[in-house]
Amino acid sequence: MSYPTTETLRDRAVAALERCGADPAAFGGGAAARSPITGAEVLPVGHASAADADAAIGRAEAAFRVWRTTPAPARGALVRRFGELLREHKSDLADLVTIEVGKSRSEAAGEVQEMIDVCEFAVGLSRQLYGRTMPSERPGHRLMETWHPLGVVGVVTAFNFPVAVWSWNTAVALVCGNTVVWKPSELAPLTALGCHALLARAAAEAGAPADVHQVVLGGAEVGGRLVDDSRVALLSATGSVRMGREVGPRVAARFGRSLLELGGNNAAVVTDSADLDLAVRGVVFAAAGTAGQRCTSLRRLIVHEDVADALVDRVVDAYSKLRIGDPFDDSTLVGPLIGPGAYEAMRGALRRAEEAGGTVLVGGGRRLAETAPGAYYAEPAVVRMPVQAEVVREETFAPILYVLTYSDFDEAVALHNAVPQGLSSSVFTRDQREAERFLAADGSDCGIVNVNIGTSGAEIGGAFGGEKETGGGRESGSDSWRAYMRRATNTVNFSEELPLAQGVSFL
Ligand code: NAD
């Protein structure tokens, strides 16, 4: 099997960028885009200074003054055109996602599809930003609410969904009348520049202000400019709990709004009535897919003791057959980790799990070290644990699946909820009472609770996000749009009297 060289990846990236309308020669320098496929630098890219970030926020603020009074369905026309361009360039953007993040081609294409889907959702939404009318307690009065745009929305994104999460925020924020400044992950600048070029083209074609969307490249310090700038009305930040802990209080200190989408530590409960065929497929995709680098990746398997051995044997068997390697190869299911740090974190977690009494049943080794010495291809690991030790309660952003057993369903729910994070969860069962119990108020405490399906791979139509240390934010579908608007409550008096509410008399 031939393995991609950094030169072939560079050529492929340049071609994809050019087709998207971005000019790699104009990217400047100061930073570099790398590929986890070889671990090497692919292209130089720019790095925003503090002044660049401030200027980008200023441009977005000026554009907001025009955009906020553009009728919402006309704003939808921009997002519709952007969605069409995404469809045309799906393969180009998927190439960039694979090159920068190492996702398999199918998962990278799925990520771009998610952008297309959320654009369609947002276009529909542009005619449905409904406010309510409530009965007034006073005669000749009308009580209603109106939703207005917020202002500049800062979007800070993580490496592992380099564009889908940005699009959830941006498509919805734009139809809501906001402008956007995006600080993409420093690990995925090319994908961001490709998307930005397409959105700029859509803006020109749809007659939207050119500055409706800005990109600023760089790391935490550039993101920090969005965090602390009071012109940024809403900061939507996706990443680790560590990042959220730094960012949340700083935005709150200036009374800004934040929408935090942070780490998960997702579990599936497999009961003794579960369809094990279904459970094995659901578990393996959720735990090993994307090399365990999804916020919704399955990290804990809580299995009834009567089916634990049978299920674990089948999962271990499936793991030993996973194709690991070049994500551009269609037969590959598991690509590289993002970098050496991720592999070290995985090795460290496996060591700690063993010290806590765990047994590594499969995986943990490194592949392709000779072919691609700068890249880190990890064998997804399954570890049987005697208890939910400290290491299991943490999110290690790598493909490790910890297995715990239970005998009573209440015990399974308690184990499930006994972690600081609260993103995604699932139960595999054929017992309706168990399924309903898991969905109930005293069941899973996560933002996403599934039945007979894994923890990852959410659709855009629902609200996405989680509780506890996951940050509480909700993005994408359902009524998540409300986070991107401000609500005005209006009381209109069309009578000739001035009755006061609550029957108060004055004058
Ligand atoms: P990260 O926290 O290292 O970085 C995320 C983004 O935040 C990057 O753009 C980074 O530059 C920026 N950043 C970091 N510190 C900052 C600061 N102090 N001020 C401003 N910006 C700052 O995360 P990562 O390694 O890129 O991504 C993996 C993490 O993201 C995992 O924990 C994963 O669970 C989480 N994640 C969560 C969701 C979700 O929707 N809940 C989605 C994707 C990823």
Image (cartoon, helix red, strand yellow):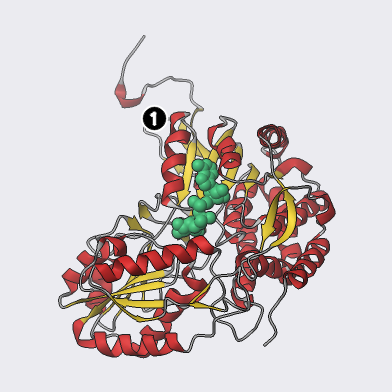
Would residue 353 be seen by someone viewing this image from the given angle?
yes
Query: Where residue 167 sits in the image (x, y, percent)?
Result: 62, 56
Position of residue 472 relative to residue 412, above or below, is above
Give the quarter of the figure containing the N terminus: bottom right
Circle 1: element type = loop
Query: Where residue 489 sits in the image (x, y, percent)?
Result: 47, 34
Q: Residue at x 55, y 38 (%)?
A: 224
Would residue 150 be seen by someone viewing this image from the given angle?
no
Number of labels in the image equals: 1
Give the quarter of the figure containing the C terminus: top left
Please tell me how crowded label 1 is: few (under 14), some (14-19), or many (20+) other residues with Cα within 10 Å: some
Which of the two residues, 257 or 207, is positioned nearer the viewer here?
A: 257
**Mark 1 highlights which residue?**
138
Which of the two residues, 82 or 471, is positioned nearer the viewer here?
A: 471
Q: Residue at x 52, y 38 (%)?
A: 486
Which of the two residues, 86 or 46, is positioned nearer the viewer here?
A: 46
Asked which quadrant contains residue 11, the reply is bottom right
Position of residue 502 relative to residue 334, above or below, is above
Query: Where residue 427 sits in the image (x, y, percent)?
Result: 31, 75
Q: Residue at x 58, y 37 (%)?
A: 226
Query: Where residue 205 sits in the image (x, y, percent)?
Result: 83, 53
Answer with left or right where residue 459 lies relative to residue 349.
Answer: right
Amino acid, disc 1 = Arg
Q: Is mark 1 within 8 Å of ligand 1?
A: no
Answer with left or right where residue 194 lies relative to residue 479.
Answer: right
Q: Residue at x 62, y 74 (%)?
A: 372
